[in-house]
Image (cartoon, rainbow, N blue to C red):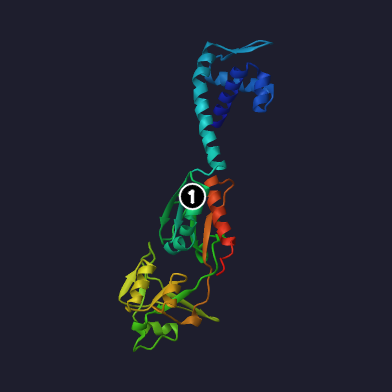
Amino acid sequence: MRGSEFHELRVFEAVCRLRSFTRAGQALLISASAVSQILRQLEERLGIQLLHRTTRSVAPTDAGARLYARLLPALSDLDAALESVNADRERPTGTMRLHVPRIAYAMHIEPALAAFHARCPEVVLDITIDDAIVDIVQQGFDIGVRLGELLEADMVAIALGAPLRQKTVAAPSYLGGRKAPEHPRDLLEHACINWRQTGSDGLYKWEYEKQDQRIAVAVRGPLVFNDRAAGLNAAVQGIGIAMSAEPRVDELIRSQQLVELLVDWTPAFPGFYLYYPRQRSMLAATRAFIDLLSETVRRPAPTR
């Protein structure tokens, strides 16, 4: 059905229900003459008279009455469907799909789940935990989480925390009897634990920066993972040197299971951002989730 045809049927329904061109026009916010013209167009298109008109009244013909009887429940169903969509826009309900990397899920999303469920108990969060870089619009996600340096320019983005650092680490058992690397190039003389991003064929090049020097090292070693946590566990066992972002690696450093290397070569970089496509309207569930995470970012860290 074309938009003009739907409008004609809406006008016809209003006239049959209110038995007046004037009252139908008032209800639809159009003039009585516009109502009359629209109904003439509908009758001409269908090739049959739908209304009896006099100077004092209007009433459906037999054909018009049959059309009205069939039309009324169909329009009621459409109204109910539109009302359901309006409810989703105004009240948090339905399903919201989120794409998030593993570490960002642990840092930012998992701690907020209980609070979000308490606030929006009718919303189902469909969460995909995945380190692959995907097009959230094409893949049907409502919201994504991604490192700031990987964001598309046309997305609305909200920082979820402070900048991060990638730390190069090794176990004391690995370093025993070996000279610790003093420059990123020294890693080529060491066994390193590689990482392959999900969905990528190549291995991640370890990136370093010091003042105006930037260097990316294609390290070599006995293991390749697509999971940073697994790589860190292998480093704890003394198999080789690993690289991972804080805060995942920080506890292992504090507990002296790992030692940080090349400290002055690892500056901070933008952390994780919640992001979503720019849009004129937004479902209430999506807005509620964004608001909750924004509140968490603004909330000061507890003091000890």
Say which residue appears at 64% left-offset and 22% top-offset.
Answer: 24
Locate residue 224 relative to residue 22 in the image: left or right: left
Please count the marks in the image. Answer: 1
What element does badge 1 sit on? helix
Question: In the figure, 69 relative to 188: above or below?
Answer: above
Residue 141 image point, x, y percent = 46, 51
Locate residue 201 relative to residue 214 in the image: left or right: left
Question: In the figure, 289 relative to 231: above or below?
Answer: above
Question: In the figure, 43 relative to 256: above or below?
Answer: above
Disc 1 crowd, CA 10 A, few/some/many (<14, 14-19, 20+): some
Which of the image's four quarters has the C terminus?
bottom right
Question: In the figure, 71 relative to 96: above or below?
Answer: above
Viewer-closest of 271 and 109: 109
Give the quadrant of residue 248.
bottom left
Q: Is residue 1 visible?
A: no
Q: Is residue 25 visible?
A: yes
Q: Amino acid at mark 1?
A: His
Residue 152 image point, x, y percent = 52, 60
Residue 164 image point, x, y percent = 51, 70
Viewer-closest of 50 and 192: 192
* Residue ID for mark 1: 117
Residue 194 image point, x, y percent = 36, 73
Viewer-closest of 298 and 86: 298
Q: Residue furthest left?
A: 222
Say which residue appears at 39% left-offset and 82% top-offset.
Answer: 187
